[in-house]
Amino acid sequence: MRLYDASVPSGNGYKVRLLLAQLGIPYERVEVDILRGESRTPEFLARNPNGRIPVLELDSGDHLAESNAILCYLADGTRFLPAERLARARVLSWMFFEQYSHEPNIATVRFWLQHLGLDEQRRRELPRKRDAGYAALGVMEGHLARRPFFVAEAYSVADVALYAYTHVAEEGGFDLGKFPAIRAWLDRVREQPGHVAIT
Ligand SMILES: N[C@@H](CCC(=O)N[C@@H](CS)C(=O)NCC(=O)O)C(=O)O
């Protein structure tokens, strides 16, 4: 297996590397310089027409894009994705939440502050992104106040997906001080067997 990932620490790439480590699956990491447009070359677009990492290349030569789809593919049939119908749908529900309400705000602001800087347009958009990011953290805090993990009392790919950008939210200027349940959950995720750090 081969994973096309960013040369800078991308949370979307990290989700996949974390699960691959926890599943003990060997793979080759290919670094793509997204800041220099390497994910937009004709060669890369043949792997993912959407021009983004991560992309998983299977031993069959097939390519799979979208971090959360890759997580579901890898987790299928393992303890990281419940077989029971409702629990499985709840895992997906949190993964869609991650992509719609969390990542576009928390990850995007981190990317701006760490890599792109704030031009006039980003500066204008920042307060709205900040509010939406805190709203997503508020939803997570309420849910985690009453349970150890997102679904069915067990660590799953829902936790992997949401951990990736939450644990580095402070790099985007989000203060986790007001979210004790999230901070306790971050510690529980870090304690899972096979955990690896973002790099
Ligand atoms: N929804 C996608 C988002 C992927 C994404 O935004 N990747 C970024 C890095 S984190 C990227 O490749 N950016 C390069 C570009 O847009 O050219 C996923 O979850 O995989």
Image: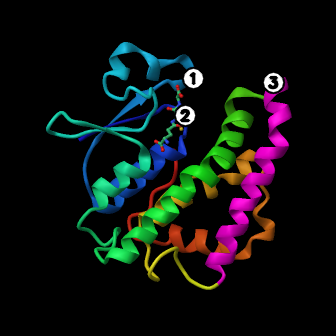
Which residues make up the magenta segment? 119-145
Query: Residue 110: image x %, image y %?
Result: 69, 42
Q: Nearer the viewer, residue 193 or 163?
A: 163
Residue hosting label 3: 119
Q: What's the residue type where badge 1 is placed? A: Leu
Which quadrant holds the N terminus?
Answer: top left
Q: Secondary structure at mark 2?
A: loop
Residue hosting label 1: 35
Going from N to C along the chain, the mark reached first, 1 or 2, is 2
Can see residue 118?
no
Horizontal side of residue 182 vs 34, given as left or right:
right
The 10 Å Cα crowd at callout 3, few under 14, some 14 to 19, many 20 or more, is few
Callout 1–callout 2 Cβ contact below 8 Å: yes
Pair 2/3: label in front: 3
Q: What's the residue type where badge 2 is placed? A: Val
Measure the C-alpha gap from mark 1 to mark 2.
Answer: 9 Å
Query: Residue 5: image x %, image y %?
Result: 42, 35
Can see residue 69?
yes
- Residue 8 is labelled as 2
The 10 Å Cα crowd at callout 1, few under 14, some 14 to 19, many 20 or more, is few
Pair 1/2: label in front: 1
